Image (cartoon, helix red, strand yellow):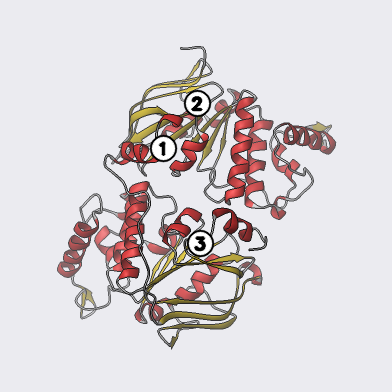
Amino acid sequence: MAADLAIEMRGVTKRYPRVLANDRVDLEVRAGEIHAIVGENGAGKSTLVKALYGLVAPDAGTIRIAGREVSRHRPSDAIRLGVGMVHQHFMLVDTLTVAENVVLGLEPRRGALLDRPAARRAVQGLSSEYGLDLDPDERVENLSVGLEQRVEILKVLYRGARILILDEPTAVLTPREARELFAILRALCDAGRTIVFITHKLDEVIRLADRVTVMRDGRVTGVVQARETTEAELAHMMVGREVLLRVDRGRSRPAEPVLEVRGLRAEGRKGVEVVRGVDLTVRAGEIVGIAGVQGNGQTELVEVVAGLRRASAGRVTLAGRDVTNRRPGEVRRAGAAHIPEDRQARGLVLEFTVEENLVLGRHRDAPYSRRGLVAREAVRGRAVALIRKHDLRPGDPAVLTADLSGGNQQKLIVARELSGRPSLLVASQPTRGVDIGAVEFVHRSLVAMRDAGAAVLLVSAELSEIMSLSDRIGVMYRGAIVAWFPGGAVTEEELGACMTGGAP
């Protein structure tokens, strides 16, 4: 093996009962570089990284870490070899301090007790060395999402990681937090660390990575220098066709108000008020975007509008009809459709087939129900038409929804919700965790709904999505809408500042 390779994977293959996740994959990562792995959902990226970290055992192939071949290793073995993984969903204990979280499981001790001064010194030293700017004594529950991520990075550094794997590291970060993370990762590389990261955001790949490995259908389709490629070229390698990276939404023609929210208040967990006096209007023929850092009341706002959460005060009207605290079925019959934030928990029944999920919400209506029984032929006919129209894959209506990729699960929800010609579409995080091909599909669909005269309320943590699709943009912070901007007349920096409580 070449002396400068931190990671060498050769012919790695992993089969599942219905999927060949990795098909003779080769991966080389040089010591001291930032290496991106990109690909559509189901391309095999996560499986490959899990094999590297010891979370899954490959069926064939070899893995070498820092020149040492490993076989059927576990995460504990990977950690001993200097590999650390920062997961997309953080694994922290909110009630503990930064220092306590970092040393958890590997605590310095004074006799039988935790040596707190030693823990503080170790964490303070690493934080200062890499510019992480963390207070060892602060409780994690008081930290922003960006600072929580730094704690996760500190955890793997404390365990001696020389190779850091990050899965979708900027998924929930503001633009400022993302820039700060990039500076930290570059500093780590300058200090001799090696970074491997998975992302859907191709602009980040160009800005941050040294080299890029592109995967499609379980195989590597190319390895390129980040500075010598473009987003369009990477997208083509990922999908196998030209991809429209930014939808041309054209001009909106807003008409009469469809959704009106006045003085809305709602409580979250443990009775804490999380929506505080929200006013907003969405008109027919426009897309209104709501930006904000996750956890500032956007989820609860959408749930109240969709009938999934009770309002404690205020009013929601849909086309002049009061739907405040109505059940989801009543809100749907009033003309609303809902693309939920969590597609698996709220949007799908994974144990149902594709055709069954495509008729959910209308399964009691004619012609899909006759005398209380499911009309199978009508359900199948609807499914076949929607599968063909929206290019759902695989194209078999009888396939279990659990066997679809994340992108195709999302396309299923969009196809179902749009098929009823709603007057209001509420789309919450509609492209979270989906590949670039599905993103293009969802964006086109939202603009098409607007142009057909529907009102669209879009809630997203992706500022590029909010900015490219929205005709008007509201920023939510601590449960209130703190600023409004016309679409196309605001920068990411201005939105990011409002999202963290700064002045508009």
Alpha carbon of mark 2 to alpha carbon of mark 3: how far? 52 Å
Q: Residue 466 at what x, y percent from top left?
A: 47, 59
Q: Are marks 2 and 3 in contact (CB under 8 Å)?
A: no
- Camera-near label (2 vs 1) is 1
Q: Please, is residue 2 above or below residue 360 in the view?
A: above
| Distance between mark 3 and mark 1 Cα atoms | 31 Å
Q: Quadrant of residue 347?
A: bottom left
Which residue bears the numbered disc 1? 38
Number of the label disc, if any, that sits on residue 73: 2
Q: Which residue is mark 3?
A: 489
Query: How would you rate the neighbour count of disc 1 (Cα within 10 Å): few for under 14, some for 14-19, many for 20 or more?
Result: many
Q: Secondary structure at mark 3?
A: loop
Residue 10 placement, left or right of 154: left
State the image coordinates of residue 396 (x, y, percent, origin top left). Answer: 20, 53
Give the residue type that dot 2 points to: His
Provide the secondary structure element on which disc 2 rests: loop
Residue 363 shows which numbered tag? none
Q: Amino acid at mark 3?
A: Ala
